[in-house]
């Protein structure tokens, strides 16, 4: 993808900045005083335009400037108040800071679909471990977000300090502060009314501008942490009161006494379950489990900026993650109802395992807080072994964990978290597999499907090992994706694998085998429905603090996301409009009234339980 007209215009404008700075040292004195600040303004506007274009926040750099201009002026105010040479140094520091934020937003947007959230500060130490995967999936033109840095450096090199008279100094400072005041007042008002401003809280960056989005996120962070425990209890109780009376579930206790083996597959999309290449299933093992057991193919990916760690949270606590905030960073020791605690109370042994370090996403602290009696991380899995994706190849991981499963007293809950299907989706080494994805071979999507085939084989080997040990028949096997999609996948080529994305933003599969019941559901569900469903099958009542609902084949189904989307069988609420899923046509908002009410109550209750650590209410 080459430079567009908009990109070229931005670069030309940035290149002209040093010339303007130099011209500010010539001409009539009255002109010099005013034009001395032009480079500052141009660099800020340039940074905004570059970020909006290169991070993909909007198609038009000009339209993206309307919302954040006031905030840009607020940033320029300190620079405008500096004298002489310090003004240029201040301009450089401002531009460099903006440029770093620009590049960070470009990377984060390409990888996660959003600008950097405030909680990302707590994840800085994890950047080296994911840098290679991110770099491999970024488009080459993303580095253009560094254009303001180059222009700022040249500007500083050629520009000379220009004195500015007191009158002009006061006038410029007053105008800059005045222009920035609306932004500051707006952020303050938004923080004050954040709890009732879901219209802005859920609005994407392309509508607000990237600086406005960052200001909004900071305001939300402050406002959400100011709520009282009494308000949190009220929100949780209001959601519980809105639920219909619980009727006897048709599957309650059908798998009573069985062990539960959770296989959390990294980045597994629901469409991979049905993908074929030259008439051959990409994942025959998982497809077979789906055919013989319970299969839910419309499970909404409900993760937010925490991605995999959000997936952990959804599955283990049946609670939503936090909007624009990584719950694993903000609340690494969650004191909330959880699946392991519920099963431990019913006499289950509990074990979690992942071929990663306990510090990543605070996994060690979270697993302990969830209630796992044993947790196995990379250092305990031994040295060496083939790697694929983000850690040990899944087959090696399963092989090294299997002896620990054999030693666990039954019944047990075992949670095995895989990493092979993690970006950047590199080719499968010959020693791990030779299957090829037909016409997609060599593409990123082809690599993804080939790794998925390897993961499917590793699952089959693990189940065969359990079967040989005589324990598979007494085990409930639960397979699902921690989140969907994936950076760099050519999703427009899914048709070559015989599948499509569907109308949900991102879906993950949920397959449950060994329960003694079977069937396939294409009704909306969410990842937070997994834990209550499994507990129901095992004959353990879900805790009161679970937001999810036990699934069955006849349920209508509702799925909600923290970004404001909500779905039921007939409608989709897309932040501020109601759409009929069958036709894709926009319909009257009243048809989504019940869905919107459910979304508001569910998200409010979930956030209240997490933020105030409500184990009982």
Image (tube, rainbow, N blue to C red):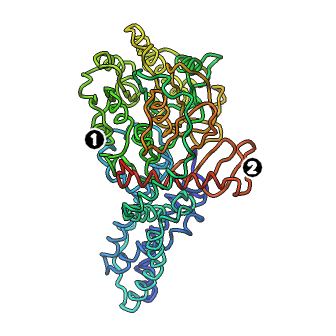
Residue visible at 46% across and 57% down?
A: 235
Earlier along the polypeptide chain: callout 1 or callout 2? 1
- Viewer-side residue, 562 vs 477: 477
- Helix, strand or loop for disc 1: helix
Q: Is residue 166 left or right of residue 13?
A: left
Q: Is residue 408 above or below residue 125?
A: above
- Viewer-side residue, 83 vs 207: 207
- Asked whether residue 385 appears in the rendered view, the answer is no
Q: Nearer the viewer, mark 1 or mark 2?
A: 1
Q: Where is residue 101? Give x, y as percent.
A: 40, 57
Q: Which residue is mark 1?
A: 365
Please tell me how many numbered marks the rendered image carries: 2
Residue visible at 32% across and 46% down?
A: 335
- Viewer-side residue, 600 vs 181: 600
Residue visible at 43% across and 18% down?
A: 458
Q: Which residue is mark 2?
A: 585
């Amino acid at each position: 993808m080459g430079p567009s007209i908009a990109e070229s215009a931005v670069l030309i404008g940035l290149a002209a900045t040093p010339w303007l700075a130099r011209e500010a040292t010539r001409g009539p004195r009255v002109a010099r005083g005013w034009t001395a600040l032009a480079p500052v303004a141009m660099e800020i506007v340039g940074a905004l335009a570059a970020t909006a274009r290169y991070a993909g926040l909007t198609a038009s750099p000009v339209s993206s400037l309307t919302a954040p201009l006031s905030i840009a002026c607020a940033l320029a105010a300190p620079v405008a108040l500096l004298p002489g040479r310090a003004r240029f140094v201040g301009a450089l520091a401002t531009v460099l800071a903006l440029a770093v934020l620009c590049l960070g937003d470009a990377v984060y947007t390409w990888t996660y679909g959003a600008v950097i959230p405030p909680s990302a500060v707590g994840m800085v130490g994890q950047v080296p471990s994911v840098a290679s995967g991110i770099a491999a999936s970024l488009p080459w033109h993303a580095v253009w977000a560094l254009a303001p840095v180059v222009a700022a450096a040249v500007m500083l090199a050629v520009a000379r300090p220009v004195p500015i008279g007191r009158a002009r100094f006061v006038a410029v400072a007053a105008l800059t502060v005045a222009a920035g005041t609306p932004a500051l007042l707006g952020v303050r008002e938004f923080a004050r009314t954040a709890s009732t401003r879901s219209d802005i809280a859920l609005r994407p960056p392309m509508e607000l501008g990237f600086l406005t989005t960052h200001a909004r996120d900071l305001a939300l962070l402050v406002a959400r942490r100011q709520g009282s425990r009494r308000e949190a209890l009220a929100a949780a109780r209001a959601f519980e009161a809105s639920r219909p009376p619980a009727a006897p579930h048709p599957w309650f206790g059908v798998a009573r006494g069985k062990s539960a083996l959770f296989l959390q597959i990294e980045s597994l999309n629901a469409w991979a379950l049905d993908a074929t290449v030259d008439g051959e299933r990409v994942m025959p093992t998982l497809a077979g489990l789906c055919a013989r057991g319970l299969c839910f193919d419309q499970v909404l990916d409900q993760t937010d900026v925490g991605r995999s760690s959000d997936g952990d949270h959804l599955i283990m606590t049946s609670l939503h993650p936090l909007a624009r905030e990584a719950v694993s960073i903000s609340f690494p020791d969650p004191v909330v109802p959880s699946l392991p605690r519920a099963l431990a109370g019913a006499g289950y042994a509990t074990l979690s395992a992942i071929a990663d370090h306990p510090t990543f996403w605070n996994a060690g602290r979270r697993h302990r807080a969830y209630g796992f009696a044993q947790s196995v991380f990379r250092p305990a899995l031994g040295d060496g072994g083939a790697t694929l994706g983000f850690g040990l190849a899944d087959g090696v991981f399963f092989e090294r964990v299997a002896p620990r499963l054999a030693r666990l007293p039954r019944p047990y809950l075992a949670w095995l978290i895989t990493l092979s299907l993690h970006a950047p989706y590199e080719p499968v080494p010959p020693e791990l597999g030779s299957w090829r994805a037909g016409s997609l071979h060599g593409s990123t999507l082809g690599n993804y499907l080939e790794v998925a085939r390897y993961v499917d084989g590793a699952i089959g080997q693990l189940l065969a090992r359990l079967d040989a040990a005589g324990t598979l028949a007494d085990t409930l096997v639960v397979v699902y994706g921690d989140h969907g999609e994936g950076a760099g996948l050519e999703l427009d080529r899914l048709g070559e694998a015989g599948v499509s994305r569907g109308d949900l933003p991102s879906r993950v599969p949920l397959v449950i085998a060994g329960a003694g019941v079977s069937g396939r559901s294409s009704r909306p569900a969410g990842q937070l429905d997994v834990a209550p469903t499994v507990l129901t099958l095992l004959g353990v009542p879900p805790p009161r603090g679970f937001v999810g609902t036990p699934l069955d084949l006849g349920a209508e189904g509702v799925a909600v996301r923290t970004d404001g989307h909500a779905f039921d069988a007939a409608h989709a609420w897309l932040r501020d409009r109601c759409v009929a899923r069958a036709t894709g046509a926009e319909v009257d908002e009243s048809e989504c009234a019940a869905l919107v009410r459910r979304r508001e109550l569910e998200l409010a209750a979930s956030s209240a339980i997490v933020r105030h650590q409500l184990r009982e209410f």
